[in-house]
Amino acid sequence: MGRPMGVIVLAVALLAGAVFHFIVPFTDFGIGSWLTATSVSREHVDPAAAPVVAALGTLGLWIALIGMILAGVMLIAMRGLWTYATWGWWLTVACLLVGLALNVIPMMHGIFTTRISLIAVFDAAFLAYLFTPQIRSFYTGGPPDISAAA
């Protein structure tokens, strides 16, 4: 069996997501650094607001760091998926579950944006695809479970 088209699409989507998660954190680092540096300037920030500005700057730095780690994990998952590794399948499932959770949680709090909704739909669709009997057996090495389709 050759590489399924859905796996190619998923691998490209993981690569695009990883690239996005590498680019955006640089902006977060820049904004976080600027806020942290600005918080010590009495000329730009009211001294009463300085702790809040500094905390936002630190938060931006942490968000950037987590985004870069996520991008690295996504690249590793994409590599494993592309090379037919069982661990790649499991890591991709984990990445998609985390991504889905990070988009469903805001929805549960009433925050619906086009981006959040679309990414949640794509994550759910990719998860469903990975758990189809043919794809799951392709990566886990077992026979396809055709009774599940009946």
Image: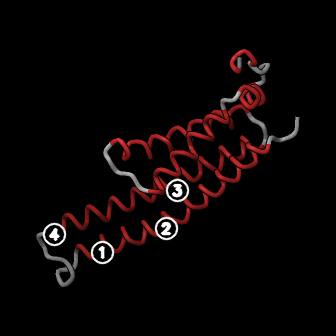
Question: Answer yes or no: do the residues labelled 2 and 1 have beta carbons within 8 Å?
Answer: no
The extreme bottom residue here reads: 43
Q: Residue at x 30, y 74 (%)?
A: 37
Query: How much space separates mark 3 and mark 2, taking CA atoms?
Result: 9 Å
**Residue matched to label 2:** 26
* Mark toward the start of the polypeptide (3 vs 2): 2
Quadrant (top left/top right/bottom left/bottom right) for the C terminus: top right
* Mark toward the start of the polypeptide (2 vs 1): 2
Decide: few, some or many residues near mark 2? Use Cα within 10 Å; few <14, some 14-19, many ≥20: some
User: From the viewer's perspective, is 104 left or right of 57?
Assistant: right
Query: How much space separates mark 4 and mark 1, taking CA atoms?
Result: 13 Å
Q: Which amino acid does label 1 sit on?
A: Ala
**Residue matched to label 3:** 68
Kindly report which numbered mark, 2 or 1, lies closer to the viewer in this rendering: 2
Question: Answer yes or no: do the residues labelled 1 and 3 have beta carbons within 8 Å?
Answer: no
* Mark toward the start of the polypeptide (1 vs 3): 1
Picture coordinates of residue 84 (x, y %)?
A: 78, 37
Q: Which amino acid does label 2 sit on?
A: Phe
Q: Is mark 4 on a helix, strand or loop?
A: loop
Of 42 and 148, which appears nearest the observer?
A: 148
- Name the quadrant containing residue 62: bottom left
**Residue matched to label 1:** 37
The extreme top residue here reads: 147
Q: What element carries label 3?
A: helix
Quadrant (top left/top right/bottom left/bottom right) for the N terminus: top right
Q: What residue type is labelled 4?
A: Ala
Question: Answer yes or no: do the residues labelled 4 and 2 have beta carbons within 8 Å?
Answer: no
* Mark toward the start of the polypeptide (3 vs 4): 4
Question: Answer yes or no: do the residues labelled 4 and 1 have beta carbons within 8 Å?
Answer: no
The tag on residue 49 is 4
